[in-house]
Structures are given as structure tokens and as C-alpha cells.
Amino acid sequence: MMRGVTPAGARLAMLFLPTVIVFAAVAVTASIAFTVQERSIRDATGERVTDVALSLAELTQVRDVLAQAHDDFPAAMAELQPLATVVERAAGVDYVVISDEEGIRVTHPTPSERGKPVSTDNTSVLAGEIYLGTETGTIGMTMRAKVPVRDDADEVIGVLSVGILESRIAADSAQAVSRLLPWVIGALVVGTLASSTIAALLERRFRRLDEAARDTAELRRSAAALREQSHEFTTRLHVIHGLISHGDADDALSYIAGVTPVTTGGSDDALSEQPLLRATLDVLRAELGAHGARLDAEVLVESVVDEEVTLVLANLCRNAGEAGATVVRCALVERAGVFVGEVADNGAGVATHDADRVFARGVSTKRDPSGLGRGIGLDLVRRTVAKRGGSVELGRAELGGARFRFEMAVLS
């Protein structure tokens, strides 16, 4: 990456680069096309005036009349002017001027200019050369061709000049440009749409990469936390195993109590046949008590509550305690082969704008002081419930906080 260019700047440049390339390409192509078109028009105009001049200079009538013009100049004008006028109209040129070797005009589109000296220099043409260029004459600036008129002895006896106004050439160029302009605009529109599509695809790809990077970072943090917890748990298991293997059961119980305070909810006959659920509730009471919260549990089931159901209950209860609730109510009933559970609290609840995304992985409304990542528990709840063909919903509890309700099929 270039020094001083931030990733965001490089990304923005990549998004706008296709559009910039399209504009540059179209601008350069259009400029070249306009230049080529103008040059083509000027070349065609030059060829036309040169061809007309050469053709007229070879006419026997022009050569014979011009050779005798000094004997009867008015008669020469009267005979050649109609020819010049017809050629002007037929060839689409603005003037045809025939002058003798002394530079006196025999023909001219303006009657008052006939019989007068020419306004431009014809020295090179009288010397036998052909001239093609732009000069300013009596009717304005014109592109003109001047060719020598020769007699039968191949002597130069005059000059034949044919020209087209530069204003007409400019108008023809503008008309050609106007015909090209829709194609240029079309190419620009198509190119812009294509570049916008590419930019949109790139932006979508960037977003996916960003999301993947965030997920990867969170998975790494979660994996690190789980490895740390697993290592600590394994160490504690080894200690407990050592105590029990040496017959020190009381010391083992004391060690467990020191690691995590354990309290029981009393001798509840309803849980006598649900050891897993009873143990889960005891652990939850201890954990919530550490947060300063009280757990009220109500259970009315006949089937055995399996590990997945207790996992959902545990995550929802922990979520309530970590959110700052002081009272957490947990209820689990069985209806027609379905476990129906509810966890409600008196905490701050979940904001409306977070309700739709609170079950997404990595999304959490709670602060993460550890830096190891949050937003895992509710995602686990959603996936566990969905795996059992159930559903979970979020609402407002009568206690004032959040209320989570879920349904899960009873395992047969």
C-alpha cells in the first residue's frame, strides 16, 4: 500500500476508478473522433476545390477565351462568367474566380469585383505551381485552390481560383459532431452504468469481506476464551479427581464450593426425577446470586428435560443476570409433547431497534470488558431451538424488563 494512503481511501479509489476510467476513455475517444472528423471534412473540401479548379483550367473554352481576353476584356467576362456561375452552383463552391496573367479578374461572384485586380498574391501560381490553403478575400476567409491556366504552347496565361468559406466548413464540422454526440453520450451512459454496477459489486464484496473479517476476529476471541476456560476447567477437574481418588471427599466438596458457590433451591419434589434440570437451576441460582439477582423457578413437566432444553434456559437466565436484572423468573411447562419455556426479568429490557438483530451472532447490548467477544449466548439459543423445530420470541415482561418465550419438541 502506498505511504499515506489509508485502507478506506484505497477502497474509495477502487470504487470510483471504473467510473473515472470510463469518463477518461470516452473523453479521449470522443476528442479523437471529433478531430478525425474535422480533418476528414477539411481534406474532402480541399480535394473538391482542387478538382474543380483543375477541371475548369483544362477546359478549352476557358483557355481560348482567356488567351484572347486582352483583345476584348468585356467579351471574355460575358462568356466566362455564366460558366463560372453554373460551376459554383453545381459543385457547391462559394466562388470561381478566373484572372488573366496580370491578375485582373475575368469572373467573380460579386459583379462589382469583376475587372479589378485580385486581392491575394498569385505569384507562385503564375510561376506554374498549384496552391491549396486558407486566405481572406473579398467574400471572407476561404479554403481555396489556385491552379495555372495554360495555352496551347504550355505558357501560363492566367489563374483559376476556387474556394469554399471557412464558415461553411466549420458548420459542416459542427453538424458532423452533432451526429457523433448521441453516440458519445450513449457510450458514456452505458459505460457509467457498467462502472456503477462494477462499483456496486465491489462494494458488496468489500462488505462481505468486512463481515467475514469481523466474524473471524470474533471467532478467534471466542476460541481463545474457550481455550482458556477449558484449560482452567481441566486443571480443576484434575484437582477434584486427585482429592476424590485419595478419599478426601469433604475436601473436594470444599474445593468446589470455593471455586463457585453452590446453593440449592430446597427439596422440591417436582424436580426429584429431573436431576439435570435441578442441578442446572441450582447452578443458575448461584450464578445469578453472584450478580445480585434472585431466580424464581416454576416447573410443570412430565417428560425428562434434556440437555438442550437446560442449555436454552441457562443461557436466557444468564443473559438476564448479566443485563443487570435483580429478579429473574423462569418457567417451564409441557403441553402436548412440547416444552414451553419463559424467562422474564426486571432489567432494562431490549431497545426496539435491537429487537430484530439481538439473536444474531456477535450482537450484544451489554458492554464487553473482557474484550473476548459477546453476543454468543442468544445466537446459541436461536440455533438450538430451531434445531428442535421450535421458535423463540422476544417481548416486554410484566416485571418491566425483557421476556423470552420459546417452544421445543419433547424428545421421544
Image: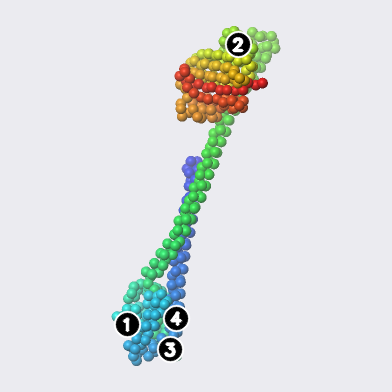
Amino acid type at circle 2 is: Ala
Q: Which of marks 3 and 1 is in front?
A: 1
Judging from the image, what secondary structure is the residue with disc 4 in?
helix
Identity of the residue drawn at 45% across and 81% down: 55
- The residue lying furthest to the front in this view is 336
Amino acid type at circle 4 is: Leu
Q: Nearer the viewer, mark 2 or mark 4?
A: 2
Give the residue at mark 2.
270
Q: Which of marks 3 and 4 is nearer the N terminus?
A: 4
- For the residues labelled 1 and 4, the Cα–Cα distance comes to 21 Å
The total of numbered circles placed on residues is 4
Q: In this view, does 80 lie above or below 9?
A: below
Identity of the residue drawn at 55% across and 38% down: 209
Q: Do the residues labelled 3 and 4 touch (CB within 8 Å)?
A: no
Judging from the image, what secondary structure is the residue with disc 3 in?
loop
- For the residues labelled 1 and 2, the Cα–Cα distance comes to 130 Å
- Tell me if I can see residue 171 in this picture: yes
Q: Which of marks 1 and 4 is nearer the N terminus?
A: 4
Give the residue at mark 4.
54
Give the residue at mark 3.
151
Label drawn at residue 100: none
Circle 3 Cα neighbour tier, 10 Å, few/some/many (<14 / 14–19 / ≥20):
some
Q: Earlier in the sequence, mark 3 or mark 1?
A: 1
Judging from the image, what secondary structure is the residue with disc 1 in?
loop
Which of 403/102 is in front? 403
Label drawn at residue 114: 1
Amino acid type at circle 1 is: Arg
Which of 374/313 is in front? 313
Q: Which of marks 1 and 2 is nearer the N terminus?
A: 1
Q: In this view, does 354 lie above or below 275?
A: below
